[in-house]
Amino acid sequence: MPIRKWIFQYLVMLIVLFTLFAGVQYLKGRELEYSLEFGMLWAFISSTIFLVVRIRNYKKRIACQLCNDLPDQ
């Protein structure tokens, strides 16, 4: 299992999604505190779902050309 690769991708995605979600909420006129909470919550949820699906696909040996996680046969 390419755990290191997934952890790095998870952390990068978490930071990018947090910035995106919090920034959009702040630009919509919400308070900074609410925007940060919203960004943290939804970035965590979205990133976790993505990671769980990647692990599930890896275990079921479902190939993904973009992810390229499965070893060549």
Image (cartoon, rainbow, N blue to C red):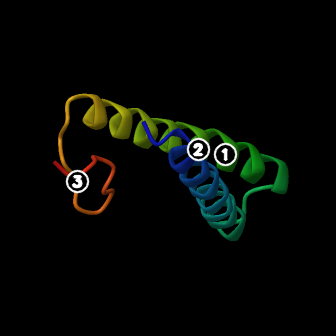
Q: In the rendered image, which quarter is residue 49 located in?
A: top left
Q: Disc 1, disc 2: CB below 8 Å?
A: no
Q: Give the mark, 3 or 1, whose residue is nearer the N terminus.
A: 1
Please give left or right for residue 55 compared with residue 48 in the image. left
Question: Which mark, residue 7?
Answer: 2
Q: Residue furthest front?
A: 73
Three-letter code for the amino acid on which mark 1 is drawn:
Phe
**Comparing labels 1 and 2, the label whose residue is closer to the camera:** 2
Q: Which residue is mark 3?
A: 64
Residue 60 screen position, x and y as percent? 20, 29
Residue drawn at x 67%, y 57% as measured from the top left: 15
Q: Tell me the crowding category of disc 2: few under 14, some 14 to 19, or many 20 or more residues within 10 angstroms, Cα based.
A: few
Question: Which mark, residue 38?
Answer: 1
Q: Give the mark, 3 or 2, whose residue is nearer the N terminus.
A: 2
Residue 17 screen position, x and y as percent? 58, 57
Q: Tell me the crowding category of disc 3: few under 14, some 14 to 19, or many 20 or more residues within 10 angstroms, Cα based.
A: few
Three-letter code for the amino acid on which mark 2 is drawn:
Ile
Q: Residue furthest bottom?
A: 27
Residue drawn at x 80%, y 55% as measured from the top left: 31
**Placement of 73 over or under 17, stated as above or below:** above
Please give left or right for residue 56 compared with residue 13 in the image. left
Distance between the alpha carbons at the discs numbered 1 and 2: 22 Å
Residue drawn at x 83%, y 48% as measured from the top left: 33
**Placement of 53 over or under 43, stated as above or below:** above
Three-letter code for the amino acid on which mark 3 is drawn:
Cys
Please give left or right for residue 66 compared with residue 20 in the image. left
Q: Secondary structure at mark 1?
A: helix
